[in-house]
Amino acid sequence: MRGFDALVIGGGAAGLMCAITAGRRGLRVAVVEHANRVGKKILMSGGGRCNFTNTGAGPANYLSANPHFCKSALARYTPSHFIELVERHGIAWHEKELGQLFCDESSKLIVRMLLDECAAAGVRVETSCAVERVVQGDGGGFRLHTARGEFQAPALVVASGGLSIPSMGASGFGYELARQFGHAVLPTRAGLVPLTLSGKHQERLADLSGVALPVTATANGTSFSNALLFTHRGVSGPSILQISSYWQPGDALELDLLPGRDALEVLLAFQHERPAAELKTVLGELLPKRFAQRLCEHWLPNRPMRQFNLPQLREVASVLQAWPLVASGTEGYRTAEVTLGGVDTDGLSSTTMQSRHVPGLHFIGEVVDVTGWLGGYNFQWAWASAHACGSALGG
């Protein structure tokens, strides 16, 4: 039996940051990770360059049954705190767009930084160490039965992530553990995920795979402006991944195909300047040609611009500004970047991440019902929730 002050299940972003924070405070901490190495999702994120935070991260960028829960942690550990850590380790970074920060070189540098920090803080990191059973002692404290023997500590932090990308080792272990200790787990579903089409929509659009264009996607009163990418099975791209967290099967999904422009004004100008040109020709100058042609085959009437009267042009404009895309589902956890839902925040302290039911038990990161937008927000929640927890352990 190996005794520690705190045990952390999960060697991802949240688990490592929590261990570092607690270790720096003099606590003896062990991280147990079932995979053969830590930080697998960090390594693959941002196309291998790790979108490690977002300069604009704030409570409004997160989904949760309790939108106020994330405020305390995010306020106490901000993007600038993490940037300071990155710079202290000499890791070069850049802003790509919309406040998204990436490593210039490789996401491996972020994992190396976290492991170096663990070493400096005296944190023990055990890989290939699957947890078989968690038992609470009669006098409090927790005992972990693992593939590498037993570990014991008065505090246990669950940082085991969600269900997204099972090929990286994701599982529902954290949710099972939460239920074991009497916590409610809100329904989970794939977030930041491509959408699939079926029937006529799929038939009409499948051969456009690879075609991309800027759009504003809207569902349930929320909108995101960014690129859309047609795929063999449906649609992807940043605007679609973002809106996927707000959309569910059966919900309306509309795309503004000319974001930031007044479609009617544009059409009237074309009608005045090029009355003989067909609609598909002028739209082909505003949109990818193959997509413009497809729109005019199935959704819009194609004829010379002079043959449209004002009410008809208004109808064309309304389709262009709110093209109804009927999605049938998502690609699921296989390709999802995050898991929506999770451990109900009603059972946790927003300042320490500690269970309100079981003293010494904490939940952080993706396993909790807090899900960020695409673009570094989920890493910032991992860092912030971990820091809040790590700062409170042993108190």
Image: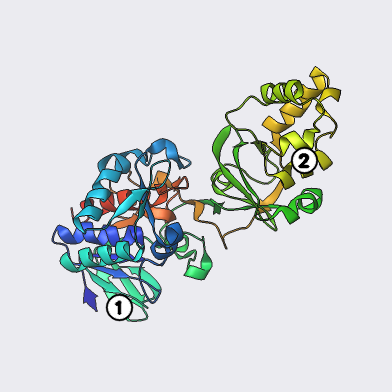
**x%, y% of residue 204?**
79, 50
User: Residue shown at 67%/30% (left/top)?
Assistant: 321
Asked whether disc 2 touches disc 1, contact meaning CB atoms under 8 Å apart, the reply is: no
Q: Quadrant of residue 126?
A: bottom left
**x%, y% of residue 94?**
34, 50
Res. 113 in view: yes
Name the kind of residue labelled 2 in the image. Answer: Leu
| Residue to which mark 2 is pinned | 295
Say above or below: 344 vs 91: above
How many numbered circles are shown?
A: 2
Q: Quadrant of the N terminus?
A: bottom left
Say above or below: 308 vs 229: above
Say above or below: 359 vs 43: above
- Secondary-structure class at tag 1: strand
Rate crowding at label 2 as few (under 14), some (14 to 19) or many (20 or more) other CA atoms within 10 Å: many
Could you tell whether 81 is left or right of 261 in the image? Answer: left
**x%, y% of residue 155?**
26, 61
| Residue to which mark 1 is pinned | 150
Could you tell whether 8 is left or right of 317 in the image? Answer: left
Could you tell whether 23 is left or right of 265 in the image? Answer: left
Colour setting: rainbow
User: Residue shown at 25%/42% (left/top)?
Assistant: 76
User: Residue shown at 77%/48% (left/top)?
Assistant: 201
Rate crowding at label 1 as few (under 14), some (14 to 19) or many (20 or more) other CA atoms within 10 Å: some
Res. 68 in view: no
